[in-house]
Image (cartoon, helix red, strand yellow):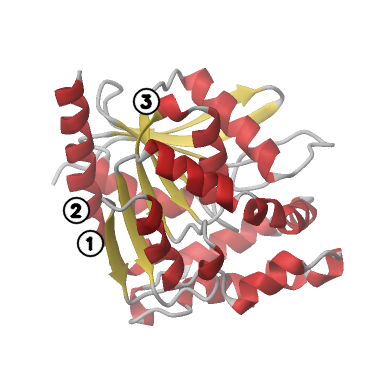
Amino acid sequence: MNIPKVYHRYSDVDGVRVFYREAGPRDAPTLLLLHGFPSSSAQYRRLIDALGDRYHVVAPDYPGFGLTEAPDGFAYSFESLTDVVERFVQHLGLTNFTLYAFDFGGPVGMRLAQRHPEWIDGLIVQNANAYAEGLSELAQGLVATTERAGVTGIMTLPVTRGQYEGGVSDPDLIAPDGWTLDQHYLDQPGRVDAQIDLALDYGSNVDLYPAWQAWLRENRPPTLILWGTGDGFFLEPGARAYLRDVPDAELHLFPTGHFALEEYLPEIAPLIDKFLARVAGEKKDQS
């Protein structure tokens, strides 16, 4: 097994100091990993180790997450997160990549894909919802919330831990490092306010579901869908719904929770490897 060197770097993007992890040869197919709530690029450390010897893997932290530093007064919305990721991609000179969208990475990634369809070689969807039937009652309640007090409860350690352990098959396979590190970053000054702003903006994503679905139908990117069926926020019907708009997509369901890689990385990593190789082969054939 070849363990890649993983570089930990910062990129200054219009006043935002974006932290990111990077591994693999720059001339290899690129995989852009977009993380979820309340996590960071750290959630992909094991996946980067599994793929970074053969692919160019890049995983940034958004403003308000992980080690990325945003200036005072930064306006936290899904549009502003996408603005930063867009400029980050341009700063690194990435012109084509497979997009891995997980959780919040779905709204950011789909906005990015709408802006730059020419960038997207392939799409990997992991518990990133884009369909109404994928929203659980809990998720619907959060989307409908308009008061800051109504979302502060999701910033606590029990909820953070529950996102990792809820719906899993074997809790002993879920390392406590994930939720512990996420909560550490969440507890930093200003972070809760940033996350509340994003939570209250989440309804803007649901409003865009029809546009994202239209984008999928029109562009039909090679798509791999990976889904933990025990997810308390995003339900299995949301995974199957992608097949309406991308009928040739691969769908793989796993009896685990929201953070499916935590329990099923040994099963998921080879699927991603095979998918990336197929996307690269198809792109080569078309050139």
Residue 132: which quarter of the image?
Answer: bottom right
Q: Position of residue 101 (x, y in %)?
A: 45, 48
The residue wearing badge 3 is 96
Crowd band around label 3 with a 10 angstrom C-alpha radius: few (<14), some (14–19), many (20+):
some
Mark 1 to mark 2: distance in Å? Answer: 7 Å
**Residue assigned mark 2:** 270
Of callouts 2 and 3, which one flags the residue occurring earlier in the amino acid sequence? 3
Tell me which residue sits at (22%, 27%) in the image: 283
Q: Can the viewer see residue 156 in this picture?
A: no
The residue under label 3 is which amino acid type? Asn
Q: Residue 7 carries which label?
A: none
Residue ID for mark 1: 266
> Residue sitting at 78 percent across and 53 percent down?
197
- The answer to whether the residue labelled 1 contacts the one labelled 2, judged by CB atoms less than 8 Å apart, is yes
Q: Position of residue 19 (x, y in %)?
A: 55, 35
The answer to whether the residues at label 3 and label 1 have Cβ atoms under 8 Å apart is: no
Q: Can residue 216 be seen in this view?
A: yes
Viewed as shown, does residue 129 lie left or right of 69?
left
Which quarter of the image is occupied by the C terminus?
top left
Quarter where residue 259 is shown:
bottom left
The kind of secondary structure element at disc 2 is: helix
Give the mark nearer the N terminus: 3 vs 1.
Answer: 3
Image x and y of residue 78, in percent:
67, 44
Q: Helix, strand or loop at disc 3?
A: loop
How many angstroms separate mark 3 from mark 1 (CA)? 27 Å
90 shown above or below 186: above
Q: Residue at x 39, y 72 (%)?
A: 174
Q: 215 and 150: which one is in front?
A: 215
Kindly identify the amino acid type of the residue bearing the numbered disc 1. Answer: Pro
**Residue 176 spot, x, y in % from top left:** 47, 70
